[in-house]
Image (cartoon, rainbow, N blue to C red):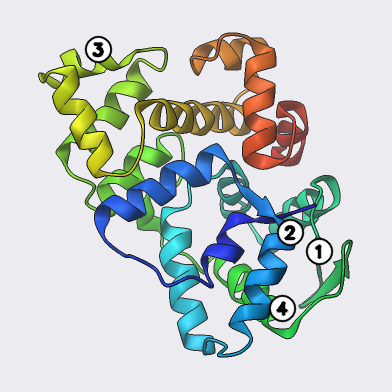
């Protein structure tokens, strides 16, 4: 059983520096979950000095603006409240979560699948959903086809990381030396910039591929193999494993919820 990564991150002191936020965006795309048992322990520790509602709201807002996970994109691109609830509830029914949270009218129904619920985790979830709903988030944060590139610009990740994400969107199967050439620097210089931002080339490349493929699933009718190849994956099996790790859904399940 798992919990969505942002819920856990919202209870941690947040380093709001550009490198850390860019690193968070990359990792949020690659793997969207933490073990539910770890989140339960973390929340139990935080209950000793629980954060205020304002602090939770600020933490969730900061993280959500940088979240590049396909699930976040899926629900935030909902056209209206009805579509939001349909997509959100579909995710909670299909993904193996420690607590399934369903939107039912104006309220929420919490259904623990592992252990008992807690007041703090309920508060975190309410803060999360309140900012996910249509009309509650800023339209200027670049949701859509080149999400990771938009986040890099939004957090001020620096020209090297912005240009790297641009290059990988244009050449998703490129290697480090290819991207260094496109940026007009040596591979060693690019590697130093990646280390400064607490990410590896492979992580950024995988994050771009996942963001690209998820956008293609939401917005087109290409076959799964065509989507996989367009996003730079070796084959559809490699693509399916990456999507499952990132979103907890297979590509076909993700596309179905996008419909």
Tag nearer the camera, 2 or 1: 2
- Do tag 2 and tag 4 residues touch (Cβ < 8 Å)? no
Count of numbered labels shown in the rendering: 4
For disc 4, the neighbor class at 10 Å (few under 14, some 14 to 19, many from 20) is some
Judging by the rendered image, the residue that carries numbered circle 4 is 122
Is tag 2's residue or tag 4's residue first in the polypeptide sequence? 2
Q: Quadrant of residue 120?
A: bottom right
Query: Looking at the picture, how far across and down is residue 103, in whole percent?
Result: 79, 67
- For mark 2, what is the residue? 36
Q: Are marks 2 and 1 in contact (CB under 8 Å)?
A: yes
Q: CA distance from mark 2 to mark 4?
A: 14 Å
- Residue 177 position within the rendered picture, expressed as x and y whole percent measured from the top left: 24, 12
- Residue 164 in sight: yes
> Are dots 1 and 3 in contact, CB under 8 Å?
no
Q: Which x, y percent locates residue 185? A: 11, 20
Badge 2 or badge 1: first in the primary sequence:
2
Instruction: State which tag comes first along the sequence, 3 or 2.
Output: 2
Look at 48% across and 25% down and name the residue there: 209
């Amino acid at each position: 059983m798992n919990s969505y990564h942002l819920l856990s991150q919202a209870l941690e002191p947040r380093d709001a520096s550009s490198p850390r936020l860019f690193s968070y965006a990359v990792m949020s795309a690659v793997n969207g979950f933490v073990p539910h048992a770890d989140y339960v322990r973390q929340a139990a520790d935080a209950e000793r000095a629980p954060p205020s509602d304002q602090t939770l709201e600020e933490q969730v807002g900061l993280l959500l603006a940088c979240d590049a996970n396909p699930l976040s994109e899926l629900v935030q691109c909902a056209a209206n409240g009805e579509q939001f609830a349909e997509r959100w509830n579909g995710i909670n029914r299909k993904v193996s979560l420690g607590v399934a949270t369903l939107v039912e009218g104006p309220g929420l129904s919490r259904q623990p699948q592992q252990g008992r619920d807690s007041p703090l985790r309920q508060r975190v979830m309410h803060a999360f959903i309140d900012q996910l709903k249509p009309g509650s988030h800023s339209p200027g944060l670049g949701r859509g086809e080149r999400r990771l590139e938009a986040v890099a610009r939004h957090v001020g990740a620096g020209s090297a990381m912005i240009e790297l994400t641009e290059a990988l969107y244009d050449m998703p199967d490129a290697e480090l030396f290819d991207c260094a050439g496109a940026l007009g620097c040596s591979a060693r210089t690019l590697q130093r910039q990646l280390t400064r931002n607490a990410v590896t080339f492979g992580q950024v490349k995988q994050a771009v591929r996942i963001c690209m493929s998820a956008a293609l699933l939401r917005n087109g009718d290409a076959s799964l193999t065509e989507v996989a190849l367009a996003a730079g994956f070796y084959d559809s099996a490699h693509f399916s494993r990456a999507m499952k790790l990132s979103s907890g859904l297979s590509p076909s399940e993700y596309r179905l919820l996008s419909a």
